[in-house]
Amino acid sequence: MTPQIIITLCVLAFLVIMLLAHRLPYGLTGMFCVGLLVLFRVTDLKTAMSGFSSSTTVMVASMIVVASQLSKTSIINRVRAAMSKLSGKSEIIVILAFFGATILLSQLMGQVACLSIMLLFCETLDEDSRLTPSRMLFSVCVLNTIWTSKIPIGMGATMPGTINAFFEGVAADYSIGITDYAKAALIPGLVGIIYCILFMKNLPTHKISKENVKEVKETVQMSQKHEIIVFAVFFVIMISFFLSGKIPSDVQNVLPLLGVCVFLITGVCSIPEVTKTITSDIVFLIASMSSISTILGATGVGELIGNTVLKILGGHPAPIFVITVFTLVTAVMTNFLSNMGTMALMIPIAASTALAGGFNVQTVVLVTACSAWMAFVMPTGCAGSMIAFGNGNYEVAETFKFTVPLFILELVSLIISTTLLFPVYA
């Protein structure tokens, strides 16, 4: 083992500890580790900063700006208007309307913003019916956790690129397509919807509160001209993504950036607004992890990690066993850590292990990425879980009858659907 590999492993161990502890912003942690690798001569500055010039980072950062503008269109107010007309409707229509609104908003905005809006609707429900406010709020929070950024619209369009940034340097010949993440998550997502409809009654009823959510104000309507521009830019970008086999990848990745330029030129958004978005912690995390992934591949540490994990799992484990282990470990971990931190930690390891074992990297990476969002069993998992337990005044133990069976069903359905859609030896 060379000094270069030893230093890289030490820096990687520090990265893991800091991601688990989350004492610093994830992006700052990643950039600090990149700096250490340059300082100790593991890599040069050009390679260390390659994450910022990576086409994936540029695309994701630009798409976050585009998605943020999409969430400011009349879509949100239209959802509000539709939900206000539910009075007197049948129970199943109310449930489907709540779940549908949650899934749509989960693609367009962050968890806290989405659930703050849904909390207002939950408060209108009858305390004496089966659809009590606390039961509906908990179910909505669970589905928000499962469905967040799964459909390639709004923020969901940025997730495949984010996943790619976490492992592209380790397994350069593999990538997650714009619809791959949605395909892997579809069946578990549908299982979640059906389960919540059938077993919402297993949740006890409590008085809900407004802790852990922000005040929700009516979305300021942008001008019709600006809204048309936003929809047109988003439509062009999405068409290019879906025509990935016919349009060069460089063209695909630069279109979101050009879309941001169009927004600035036409006054849809301001320069300070764009600057704030593209310098956010998530962008720095993506850029730094892209660089670290490249360094792991160049130094051979990625291969070393993959072979080590295989040895721990028995030397020549069956691929379904490897997939099950990564799915279970990631899903358990994400209930105590943040979703994005869990993804950043586990995806490079999953890709390295799949590559070392000769498995389809897509399969192992996708189950890992999807299971990083099954954070509904514990209140420590994510903002959605915090709101579900905190605002619903639920104790963890009293929700197990509802959450544990769903957790198992989600894991099983994810493994089955992903291995069917993405064969392990493809």
Image (spheres, rainbow, N blue to C red):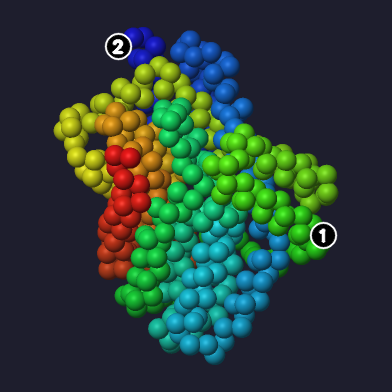
Residue that numbered label 2 is attached to: 1
**Drawn side of residue 96 relative to residue 204, left or right:** right
Q: Residue at x 43, y 87 (%)?
A: 128
- Which amino acid type is shown beneath numbered disc 2? Met
Q: Residue at x 37, y 60 (%)?
A: 188
Residue that numbered label 1 is attached to: 225
Q: Is residue 10 above or below residue 236?
A: above
Q: Quadrant of residue 349?
A: top left
Q: Position of residue 207 (x, y in %)?
A: 45, 76
Q: Quadrant of residue 395?
A: bottom left
Q: Is residue 276 above or below residue 400?
A: above
Q: Nearer the viewer, mark 2 or mark 1?
A: 1
In which quadrant is the C terminus drawn?
Answer: top left
Q: Position of residue 23 (x, y in %)?
A: 47, 36
**Drawn side of residue 246 relative to residue 205, left or right:** right
Q: Which mark is residue 241?
A: none
Q: Position of residue 411 (x, y in %)?
A: 30, 55
Q: Is residue 209 above or below residue 299?
A: below
In this rendered view, identify the residue nearer to me: 25 or 292. 292
- Secondary structure at badge 1 equals helix
